[in-house]
């Protein structure tokens, strides 16, 4: 039987109360929501927080809404809720694509968006999806709140800029009309972490919508810096939206990724997947931008 | 710490350590051993129970997190007039072999039909995709859930 080490526990009902408890219990306290990363780590004693602050009842953190020109997702939103959201369907199908391949329905019922981002696993799908669409996160602490771009959010594997005493409260994604987005993942078996995955968002321009105005590419599990293929994105701007452009973007994305060999596959295979999935995700996103695919 | 959890409609108050997992609370504190305990790593899903109506893996939920909440286990499925249609479906279609995954499968099936009374085979397979049948008896599990959906629909129209 796997049993976590002992800890203090309190349920918070507001962000204010959560921050007070974090201040009171110090840097070895952890916030818990879905718990589907933290509890397994505690069972294995890879994590030994001295106290847990349960935010499952902090209702103010559970929402998906449009605020001005941003799609806003509360940190306590469950994966299942993001998957089922009509706003996601309307604006950013990349999130629904990613959610369909994250773990399984039971885990998605419990796990949260904020928790996944803060866990900062290098193979985490939403980090790549959010990176592709220029998301930022809102972090609140005793001194107020700050907004951090996703490209500055991850410090390294399992490490983010969220400091002791702070709480990630919201993810904001700019809504840019006229685009399309998609996410593709190769996994060893259903519900597993990615061998490699790529998300793409694309906005078209020109008289026939055949020139790329803007592109975003996110990569998971292949060691892309900040989960993002910046060089491939830059290459695409102003290029024709053709398979040849997407293939070249894939080649660039693969070149700049830095996968490590593990039980999910060797370096060459992962790098190949990074390129191929980038090209395919760009193709799917473009089809959606053109309304060519259901 | 003291918690009060409503399990299958009945309120239970116990003094527990915060590190106690919900699956062990149900089995060891309340004696409800219908909920099984399998991989302990939120992979196999035999420990699935409903928490405020939503199926979750109870090996990855702390008992204290269920304080003030409604938990549903296989013991609570039976109705005043007999077995729940999902239970009947598993009987009719041979939906179990060793029975280890069955309580979790039944809870997920019940939750699926509550949300979607007429699920396709694909939707059923998706719903149970977080649960492992060690006998690999998935074909009959899917048939059992379809049986339940069809017979529940007849009940409603009857």
Image (tube, coloured by chain):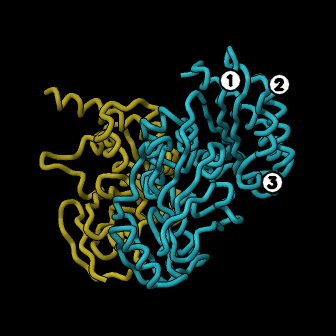
Q: Which residue is drawn at 71% across and 55% down?
A: A226
Say which chain tag 2 marks.
Answer: A
Q: Which of A225 and B2 is in front in this view?
A: A225
What residue is pinned by disc 3?
A259
Say which chain tag 3 marks.
Answer: A
In the picture as drawn, the residue positioned furthest to the top comes out as A208
Q: What colour has chain B? A: yellow
The relative height of residue B33 versus residue B123 in the rendered view (above or below) is below
- SS of the residue under disc 3: loop
In the picture provided, is A142 more to the left or to the right than A94?
left
x and y percentages locating residue A289 in the rendered image? 61, 25
What residue is pinned by disc 1?
A205
Q: Residue at x 76, y 45 (%)?
A: A229
Q: Residue A244 carries which label?
A: 2
Count neighbours of disc 3 (C-alpha within 10 A) and say few if under 14, some if 14 to 19, many if 20 or more: many
Whole-number angstrom distance, CA of label 1 to CA of label 3: 34 Å
In the picture provided, is A282 more to the left or to the right than A144?
right
Mark in the foreground, 3 or 2: 2
Q: Do the residues labelled 3 and 2 touch (CB within 8 Å)?
A: no
Mark in the foreground, 1 or 3: 1
Q: The cyan chain is which one?
A: A
The relative height of residue A252 versus residue B26 in the rendered view (above or below) is above
Count neighbours of disc 1 (C-alpha within 10 A) and say few if under 14, some if 14 to 19, many if 20 or more: some
**Which of disc 2 and disc 3 is earlier in sequence?**
2
Whole-number angstrom distance, CA of label 3 to CA of label 2: 24 Å
| Quarter of the view holding residue B93 | top left
């Amino acid at each position: 039987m796997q049993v976590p080490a002992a800890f203090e526990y309190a349920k918070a009902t507001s962000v204010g109360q959560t921050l007070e408890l974090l201040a009171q219990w110090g840097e070895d306290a952890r916030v818990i929501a879905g718990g589907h990363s933290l509890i397994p780590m505690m069972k294995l004693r890879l994590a030994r927080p001295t106290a847990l602050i349960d935010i499952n009842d902090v209702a103010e953190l559970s929402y998906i809404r449009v605020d001005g020109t941003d799609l806003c997702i509360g940190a306590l939103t469950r994966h299942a809720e993001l998957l089922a959201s009509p706003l996601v369907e309307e604006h950013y199908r990349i999130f629904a694509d990613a959610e369909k391949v994250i773990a399984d329905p039971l885990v998605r019922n419990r796990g949260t968006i904020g928790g996944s981002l803060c866990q900062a696993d290098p193979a985490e799908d939403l980090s790549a999806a959010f990176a592709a669409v220029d998301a930022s996160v809102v972090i609140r602490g005793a001194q107020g709140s700050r907004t951090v771009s996703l490209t500055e959010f991850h410090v390294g594997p399992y490490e983010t800029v969220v400091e002791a005493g702070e709480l990630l409260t919201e993810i904001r994604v700019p809504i840019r009309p006229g685009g399309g987005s998609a996410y593709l993942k190769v996994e060893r078996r259903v519900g597993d972490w990615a061998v490699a995955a790529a998300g793409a968002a694309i906005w078209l321009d020109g008289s026939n919508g055949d020139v790329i105005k803007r592109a975003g590419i996110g990569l998971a599990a292949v060691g892309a810096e900040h989960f993002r293929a910046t060089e491939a994105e830059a290459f695409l701007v102003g290029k024709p939206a053709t398979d040849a452009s997407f293939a070249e973007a894939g080649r660039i994305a693969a070149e700049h990724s830095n996968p490590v060999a593990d039980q999910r596959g060797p370096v060459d295979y992962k790098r190949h997947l990074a390129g191929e999935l980038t090209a395919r995700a760009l193709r799917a996103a473009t089809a959606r931008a053109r309304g060519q695919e259901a | 710490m003291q918690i009060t959890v409503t399990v299958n409609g009945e309120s239970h108050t116990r003094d527990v350590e915060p590190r106690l997992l919900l699956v062990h609370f149900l089995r060891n504190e309340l004696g409800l051993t219908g909920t099984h305990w399998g991989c302990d790593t939120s992979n196999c899903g035999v420990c699935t129970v409903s928490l405020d109506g939503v199926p979750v893996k109870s090996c990855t939920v702390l008992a204290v997190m269920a304080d003030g909440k409604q938990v549903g286990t296989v013991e609570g499925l039976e109705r005043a007039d007999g077995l729940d249609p999902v239970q009947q479906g598993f009987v009719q279609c041979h939906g179990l072999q060793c029975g280890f995954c069955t309580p979790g499968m039944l809870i997920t099936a019940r939750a699926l039909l509550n949300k979607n009374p007429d699920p396709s085979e694909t939707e059923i397979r998706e719903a149970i995709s977080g649960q492992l049948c060690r006998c690999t008896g998935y074909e009959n599990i899917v048939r059992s859930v379809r049986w339940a959906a069809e017979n529940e629909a007849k009940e409603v129209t009857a």
